Image (cartoon, grey):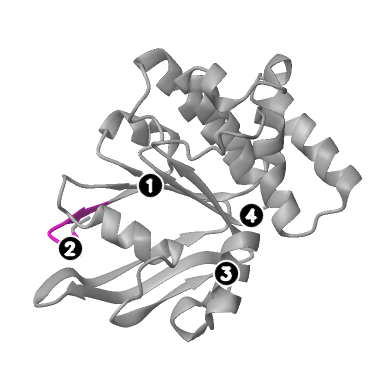
Amino acid sequence: MNKAVTILEVKDVKKAYGQVEVLHGVTFDIADGQRVALTGPSGSGKSTLLNCLCGIEPIDSGFIKVNGQVFAQSSRRELERVRRESIGYVFQAFHLLPTLTALENIELPGQLIAMPTKERKERARHLLEAVGLSPRARHRPDTLSGGERQRVALARAVMHHPRLILADEPTGSLDSASGKRVLDLLETLSRELSIALLLVTHDLHSTRICERSISIRDGRITG
């Protein structure tokens, strides 16, 4: 049996703001295509850890490795390349560009990595269909419901063939029916495209789409 490839490796990561240590030696990993939930109460360190995983916040010690690239050893340009090429993002607040249509929002990551135009447009249309929104292709975000906007965000997150999706409370601003549909789509896209997923959530029901869960409390992994 072949050993699973590790896509995300977090080793003894520490992070402090001034004298306040927020992350106390966090360690875990995620294998290729694996879906993992990260749970914990407010103030547990989830948001800080996610910012470190995104490369937004520098860590004080330890290391974060994404698809074989160590963040702490990367230049800013190299870090940006890893983020553009290897990671897809889904946020609670959607973060769609308001001046672009649904289809154009999905295409954007493909443009950032210089995907050929024909391939980019075909993939964006395919993904829009996959999330059930082909009739809304020319609609801008302010004309879409919250659930529709998040489905566009899911399609955008996988547009550039990432190896890892970081999803931060993706159903937090949705009603239960829309939230269920988004979670089901997130699971389907992750499974069918073999993309690893880290789902950050305080909602234990959301963890049903994941193969394993880890919990964080007071900046430490507790299970």
Residue type, label 1: Arg
Looking at the rendered image, the disc whose residue lies closer to the viewer, 3 or 2, is 3
Separation (CA) of disc 4 from disc 1 = 21 Å
Residue type, label 2: Gly
Q: Is residue 82 above or below residue 72?
A: above
Mark 2 or mark 3, which is nearer the start of the sequence?
3
Q: In the rendered structure, find residue 80 and report the number of the disc placed on it.
A: 3
Q: Is residue 218 magenta?
A: yes
| Number of other residues with Cα within 10 Å of mark 2, as a class: few under 14, some 14 to 19, many 20 or more | many
* Dots 4, 1 in contact, CB < 8 A: no
Q: Main secondary structure of the magenta part?
A: strand
Looking at the rendered image, the disc whose residue lies closer to the viewer, 2 or 1, is 2
Separation (CA) of disc 4 from disc 2 = 28 Å
Q: Secondary structure at mark 4?
A: loop
Q: Secondary structure at mark 1?
A: strand
Separation (CA) of disc 4 from disc 3 = 14 Å
Mark 3 or mark 4, which is nearer the start of the sequence?
3
Q: In the rendered structure, find residue 212 and report the number of the disc placed on it.
A: 1
Residue labelled with disc 2: 219
Q: Residue 37's spot in the image, x, y percent?
A: 36, 46
Magenta residues? 215-221
Q: Residue at x 54, y 37 (%)?
A: 96
Q: Residue at x 65, y 34 (%)?
A: 100
| Number of other residues with Cα within 10 Å of mark 3, as a class: few under 14, some 14 to 19, many 20 or more | some
Q: Is residue 204 left or right of residue 189?
A: left
